[in-house]
Amino acid sequence: MKIVLLGPPGSGKGTQAKILSEKLGLKHISTGDLLREETKKETPLSKKIKEILDEGKLISDEFVFEILKQNLPSDNYILDGLPRTVSQAKMLDDMVKIDFIFLIDVEDEFIVERIVNRRMCPKCGRIYNLKTNKPKNDTLCDVCSVPLIQRDDDNEEVVRKRLSEYHNQTEPVLDYYSSRLIRIDGEKPIEEVTQQILSKINRL
Ligand SMILES: [Zn+2]
């Protein structure tokens, strides 16, 4: 089975990809995984990645896709957040037949709300949410009793910027896939989102 899983940053897409890959025995392929695996090898591509990273530059989508093409298994995988552009989606269609294309659909406001209310324990790493998963004491970790912190990136400005980048880049991909796109309500709890996906592929 070949699955493409798309969704905005903060939609829980990565979490779902991980759960599904375990439940269905699929290889979970994300941009981060691809880069990490490739840099472990001694190839012309891995050398180039290291050069780009050493210079502190960003790895382009084209380059990530190049690595994907060279590492795509023949079957049984879930692509997490790939393809990122219409030309990549077309290239992918030329290479393989994807069985299911899912969009974890979540409103921007829901993501902003979730992220600005996120707090973390600096000691144990436990994640809380001031609205949906409150600590017993508003400011302290339930386990360690140390003050919770808000990560620098978890602010509205950063989140909205990321969401707008996502929309600019991914809307055309969603349009390209429109007839095959299966929308999943991503505003439900994690288990329910997984169940929705599994029911679509008849694996409940
Ligand atoms: Zn703690």
Image (tube, rainbow, N blue to C red):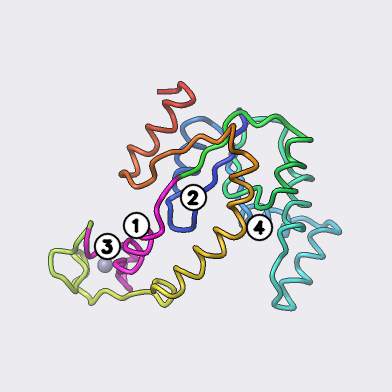
Q: Marks 1 and 4: in contact by CB < 8 Å?
A: no
* Ligand 1 within 8 Å of the CB at mark 4: no
Mark 4 → mark 1, Cα distance in angstroms: 31 Å
SS for tag 2? helix
Which disc number belongs to residue 110? 1
Q: Quick one: which residue is furthest to the right in this view?
A: 44
User: Which residue corresponds to mark 3?
Assistant: 128
Q: Could you tell me which residue is drawn at 76 percent across and 57 percent down?
A: 62
Categorize mark 3 by other alpha carbons within 10 Å: few (<14), some (14-19), many (20+): some
Which quadrant, please, contains the C terminus?
A: top left
Q: Marks 4 and 3: in contact by CB < 8 Å?
A: no
Instruction: Of the two numbered discs 3 and 1 on the same chain, state the one appearing first in sequence.
Output: 1
Instruction: Of the two numbered discs 3 and 2 on the same chain, state the one appearing first in sequence.
Output: 2
From this view, report whether residue 79 is shown above or below residue 179.
Answer: below
Instruction: Of the two numbered discs 4 and 1 on the same chain, state the one appearing first in sequence.
Output: 4
Q: Indicate which quadrant contains ligand 1.
A: bottom left
Which disc number belongs to residue 14? 2
- Is 110 covered by the magenta stretch? yes
Q: Amino acid at mark 2?
A: Gly
